[in-house]
Amino acid sequence: MSYIVKNCPARPIIWNDNWCNKEQQFCQNCIDCVIKQVIENCKNKIHIYECYDTDYALGKVECAKSILQLFDIEEIRE
């Protein structure tokens, strides 16, 4: 599943498309951009730590969720 980060700073606001200026391709095709690395890292931390019932694990999950809320993510079904 791929996705578009609608509020990514590399995406031009002037055009109404999903183009990434930095990678010179469509956002959904950019898999190595820093923003998507942060998003994937947060999703992985949530997946790993949400089953633990310790303050440490819950803190990691809450931090990852709060970071993910900063991004406007639109999933693309292929």
Image: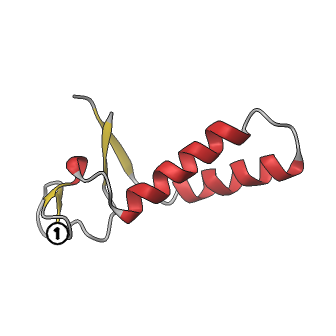
Return the residue nearer the eye: 76 or 48: 48
Question: Which color scheme does this rendered protein use?
Answer: secondary structure
**Residue at left offset 31%, top offset 71%:** 9
Q: Residue type at mark 1: give it.
A: Asn
Mark 1: secondary structure:
loop
Residue drawn where x is 57% and y is 44% of the image: 44
Q: Is residue 55 above or below residue 51?
A: below
Q: How many marks?
A: 1
Position of the N terminus by quadrant: top left
Instruction: Let me know if residue 52 appears in the view.
Output: yes
Q: Residues within 10 Å of mark 1 (few under 14, many from 20)?
A: few
The residue positioned farthest toward the top in the image shown:
78
Residue 71 visible in the shown view:
no
Q: Percent x, y for residue 41? A: 53, 52
Residue 26 at x, y = what percent?
16, 53
For the C terminus, which image quadrant? top left
Quarter location, residue 15: bottom left
Residue at left 50%, top 60%? 70
Residue 43 pos. (x, y %): 55, 44
Residue 7, horizontal then vertical, whole percent: 34, 62
In the figure, residue 17 lies in which quadrant?
bottom left
Residue carrying label 1: 21
Above/below status of 24 relative to 72: below
Q: Residue furthest right?
A: 54
Q: Residue at x 79, y 47 (%)?
A: 58
